[in-house]
């Protein structure tokens, strides 16, 4: 049962990248807290499957964050259906693991276009709608500890997440007086169905050993922070970048 301070009854939450991984879990958490959840991603079949598992109100919309037209269409549908949304979980993301010497422009653009430009497109449309209607709201960008430190073979991903961290702070500064809060969660290594096989490999096990807590995080260990930032419990928080990483960022190795 969700504590009353985190209750989201009457709120509309939009989640991008909702078809798998953390996005899928976030939808369940928000729904359990009472929010009406807008599930958005490219894989609509996966979204419909997720929708069938949610007990509360939810709606499925196709979204490709790399397409201006797709983002515009989504927010027109949101406006028609709800007027606006109250909460944005800006979660859509991809990765393409390559050594820097092997990194080409196509790979670079693939990651930046989704993880940074896509996040910008969605956040801009979401906040434009709030400003038009003079409504407050909460943007939660899903960054990464790799936006705050680097890792091997992750140049484009780290650059995109670092850009998202600064985008979060800049948005927070400029939108604060309009009642729009903008914060970011910076997860460390969190176990999901997407990375489960990797973390069972020798390379994956070496990553786990670099975490001071000597284990992976669980999706559920992001719930408290997600609900804090989504709810009025964080009404005086904006511009915060909060790691959830088992101590990874304080490890000097």
Image (cartoon, rainbow, N blue to C red):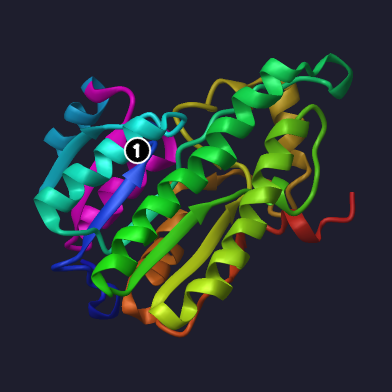
Q: Is residue 10 left or right of residue 162?
A: left
- Residue at image mark 1: 71
Q: Residue at x 22, y 34 (%)?
A: 61
Residue at point 19% right, 60% down? Answer: 35
Can the viewer see residue 177? yes
- Identify the residue at horizontal 65%, vertical 25% (top origin): 109
Q: Is residue 6 left or right of residue 117?
A: left
Q: Secondary structure at mark 1?
A: helix
Q: Quadrant of residue 76?
A: top left
Give the left or right position of residue 37, taking residue 142 as reference. Answer: left
How many callouts does the rendering have?
1
Q: x, y (%) of residue 135?
A: 27, 73
- Magenta stretch encompasses residue 85: no
Q: Position of residue 245 (x, y in %)?
A: 64, 54
In the rendered image of this protein, does residue 117 appear above or below residue 42?
below
Q: What residue span does the magenta drawing correspond to?
A: 21-44
Residue 32 colored in magenta in the image: yes
Residue 9 x, y percent position in the rendering? 15, 68
Examine the rendered structure and indicate whether residue 212 appears above or below residue 21: below
Residue 54 in sight here = no
Location of residue 243 (image quadrant): bottom right
Crowd around label 1: few <14 · some 14–19 · many ≥20 (10 Å) = many
| Residue 70 image position (x, y, % from top left) | 33, 31
Q: Residue furthest front?
A: 132
Res 1 quadrant in image = bottom left
Residue at 79% x, 50% y is 149
């Amino acid at each position: 049962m969700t504590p009353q301070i985190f209750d989201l009854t009457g709120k509309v939450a939009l989640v991008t990248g909702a078809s798998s991984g953390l996005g899928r879990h976030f939808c369940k958490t928000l729904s359990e807290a009472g929010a009406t959840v807008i599930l958005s991603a490219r894989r609509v079949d996966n979204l419909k499957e997720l929708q069938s598992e949610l007990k509360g109100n939810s709606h499925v919309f196709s979204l490709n964050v790399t397409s201006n037209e797709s983002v515009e269409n989504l927010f027109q549908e949101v406006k028609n259906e709800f007027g606006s949304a109250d909460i944005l979980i800006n979660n859509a993301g991809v990765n393409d693991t390559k050594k820097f010497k092997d990194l080409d422009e196509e790979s670079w653009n693939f990651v930046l276009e989704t993880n940074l430009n896509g996040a910008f497109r969605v956040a801009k449309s979401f906040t434009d709608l709030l400003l038009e209607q003079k409504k407050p709201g909460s943007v939660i960008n899903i960054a990464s500890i790799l936006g705050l430190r680097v890792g091997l073979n992750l140049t484009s991903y780290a650059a995109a997440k670092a850009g998202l961290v600064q985008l979060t702070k800049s948005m927070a500064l400029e939108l604060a007086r309009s009642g729009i809060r903008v914060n970011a969660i910076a997860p460390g290594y969190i176990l999901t169905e997407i990375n489960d096989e990797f973390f069972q490999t020798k390379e994956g096990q070496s990553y786990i050993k670099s975490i001071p807590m000597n284990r992976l995080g669980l999706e559920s260990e992001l719930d408290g922070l997600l609900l804090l930032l989504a709810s009025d419990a964080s009404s005086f928080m904006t511009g915060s970048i909060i790691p959830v990483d088992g101590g990874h960022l304080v490890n000097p190795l």
